[in-house]
Amino acid sequence: MWLDRRTPWSPLAAVVLSLWISIDNLTSGNTLLVTGNIIMLAGLLISSVAGVLDIRHNRRHRTLPPPKPLSRQNPRRTAVRFAVAGLLADAVGDAAPEAPDWDGPGPVLFALLALMVAFVPGRFMLLLSIPLSAVFILGVLADPEPLDRLTNPTAQPLGFAGTVLQLAGLTTAVIAGVIAVLPPKPTPTKA
């Protein structure tokens, strides 16, 4: 949020992430874990409400409208397009080996994240997608199931292709996202 503090919508990343974690963490059968998740949920709901109030405050006190990610005025529009394509590729790659029996919300969440990166003004959705994509790369590489698909491509060709597409999409999203959030080089002024 601090990196994109100039845009009024920067707290939206905190709201979206808080709600996602809140919904995802109440599915355990362990009572102690669910109790801890309820306590965490209370904190996340407080951060969600605070984020919404901060958005309201920022919108009332903004000076310049935030740039639209895919507008011609955005000097990093091409990088945004690549980041969106990478996030969509991850969603397809994540869904491919399991379709239609998904084991989690990953494909839908990354498709929604791609839409938000494309259409929500400001840089904060990109700033959210970069670490999220990087963490999911680590998650794919740490999980034995995708690693088995990568090391044995003939056993599960669709799983292999999906995992490769997922990793390629996430890597593209990280690299293009970093390029897209870099501040543009100042144009020299003519004397």
Image (cartoon, grey):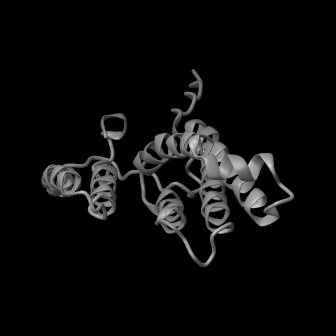
Residue 13 coordinates in the image, percent (x, y): 34, 51
Residue 71 coordinates in the image, percent (x, y): 56, 57
User: What's the residue at 65%, 53% (across, down)?
Assistant: 86
Q: Quadrant for the N terminus, please.
A: top left
Extreme residue in the bottom direction: 100
User: What's the residue at 59%, 24% (across, down)?
Assistant: 188
Q: Which of 62 and 91 is in front in this view?
A: 91
Res. 56 in view? no
Q: Quadrant for the C terminus, please.
A: top right
Q: How many labels does the image show?
A: 0
Apparent side of residue 126 relative to residue 140 in the rendered image (left or right): left
User: What's the residue at 19%, 57% (across, down)?
Assistant: 31
Res. 178 image quadrant: top right
Res. 166 image quadrant: bottom right
Res. 98 in view? yes
Residue 36 coordinates in the image, percent (x, y): 17, 49
Res. 163 image quadrant: bottom right
User: What's the residue at 65%, 66% (across, down)?
Assistant: 92
Apparent side of residue 189 relative to residue 37 in the rendered image (left or right): right
Extreme residue in the right direction: 154
Extreme residue in the top direction: 191
